Image (cartoon, helix red, strand yellow):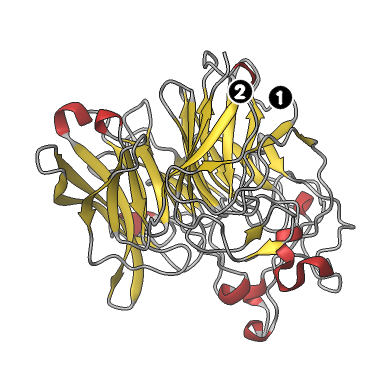
Amino acid sequence: MLISRCITFCSIVICTILFASALSAAPNQEIPTTEPFTGRVVLDGLDAPWGMIWGPEGKLWITERQGKRVVEVDPVTGKKTVLLEIPDVKIGPQHEGVLGLALAPDFGSSSLLFLTYTYLDGEKELQKIVTYKFDSGSKKLTEPKEVISGIPAGNDHQGGRLVFGPDGALYLSKGELGHNQGANRCKQNEAQRLPTAGEIAGKDYSAYVGKVLRLKPDGGIPDDNPTLNGVRSHVFTLGHRNPQGLKFIGERLFSVEQGPSTDDELNLLVSGGNYGWPLIAGYPDDQAYGYINWSAVDGCEKIDGSVYLPPDQPAEKETKWSRKDFKEPVRTFYTMPSAYNFQDAKFGQLAYLGWATIAPSSLDYYPADGPIKAWRNSVIISSLKNGALYRVPLSQDGQQAQGDIIKYFHTPNRYRQVLISPDGKSIYVITDKTGNFLDENGLPSQQPANPGSLFVFEYKGE
């Protein structure tokens, strides 16, 4: 079940680009930016960094997706220490490997880290969550203990963020593995399929794709998880494409999700909510997206299986699908009219880079009492396509987007995750090792200026 979509110019104004292009830089070299910020490279040479959290003693803990490890980085000096290496990780060019990580809520007493990665069971690709105990003396993560395994995995749209909520539950974002598009076009998209009672009893988690999962820390199903189609499982929400960011803001859980050729989404997740994919992208507005089940088409292996809507291919309108549990996004990047030309020659074979989507990869929250007044009470989102951060101001009650989306700190790179320092004065970004993106001139590039790097942008204002 897939995608299709047209796209045109954005309906939301993007203003104030605070950061121009960056030159290839070695650690501690400055990255050009504008006041009141300075920028520098803290560390380079990371092997496809993917997840980043604050560890003990003010250090950063970072997963290296292809490096099969977790490292500790001093955010001031850039000194790197390997905490863990995992030989049995299945890696790939984009979505497979060591992904998200989260400290246990009681880390001070338990010293437990929760980690998720992909692995092989015979020829079957799967995902698991494992805990490790941190030994502060040896600076090693030891005593692995499996929390849950057998979650479907693949070579596309893996999701993979892990966060603990204030309720003590563990949340994992899961993509729909890119089914019904591109090389996976003949595989059915199951973002709308829910598990049966028999599957849950047999620990068959094959329906856990295109979902956000909610687990007990021991891997069990929380008693207050939603009952969907008469079955209570780990499924918290459904209808997701590739949710790569999760963040609690108080009691509310926000996510960012990559759309097809239009409508990346910022979502507020609620228990049992259905976020529409693949029947709806963004809002149910019939603008530039219609669902085509390529996997059900005879000879699907010979068709294009594109993520945009071919003009000669009939598709289901978004407004045809109506469900009471559907939840609209807080904001999209961006909703485009149907007249948009997806095949702009300027972008050549990388036409998708010209579409008005940003490929959001993570999000963080800038608090209402932070020192950067203009940033207060805002969601900060990292972009893979544009190598930039996007700030989305929130309403006072924190439930709606308010005002224009503002773009910051553009460099010719792919930004994998953003993380704000506890004092609110530093913004850390890790960059992809490889991939396609728009350079400082808005043209396609495959040569990032700072592959596998850690940046910091520091606020120097009053």
Q: Position of residue 211 (x, y in %)?
A: 48, 50
- Compared across the picture, whether 2 is left or right of 131 comes to right
* Residue sitting farthest toward the left: 137
Above/below status of 192 relative to 343: above
Residue at coordinates 33% horizontally, 78% vertically from top-left?
Answer: 123
Disc 2 marks which residue?
375
Q: How many marks?
A: 2
Q: 317 or 19, which lies in front?
A: 19
Residue at coordinates 28% horizontally, 60% vertically from top-left?
Answer: 202
Q: Amino acid at mark 1?
A: Gln
- Compared across the picture, whether 212 is left or right of 359 comes to left
Q: Amino acid at mark 2?
A: Trp
Residue 171 shows in this picture:
no
- Compared across the picture, whether 47 is left or right of 323 comes to left
Quadrant of the snapshot with the N terminus:
bottom right
Q: Earlier in the sequence, mark 2 or mark 1?
A: 2
Above/below status of 15 relative to 46: above
Crowding around mark 2 (Cα neighbors within 10 Å: few <14, some 14 to 19, many 20+) is: some
The image's mark for residue 402 is 1
Callout in the foreground (2, 1)? 2
Residue at coordinates 21% horizontally, 46% vertically from top-left?
Answer: 131
Residue 144 shows in this picture:
yes
* Residue sitting farthest toward the right: 339
Q: Secondary structure at mark 2?
A: helix
Above/below status of 72 relative to 251: below
Mark 2 to mark 1: distance in Å? Answer: 12 Å
Q: Position of residue 280 (x, y in %)?
A: 69, 51
Q: Secondary structure at mark 1?
A: loop
Q: Position of residue 195 (x, y in %)?
A: 43, 55
Q: 391 or 313, which lies in front?
A: 391
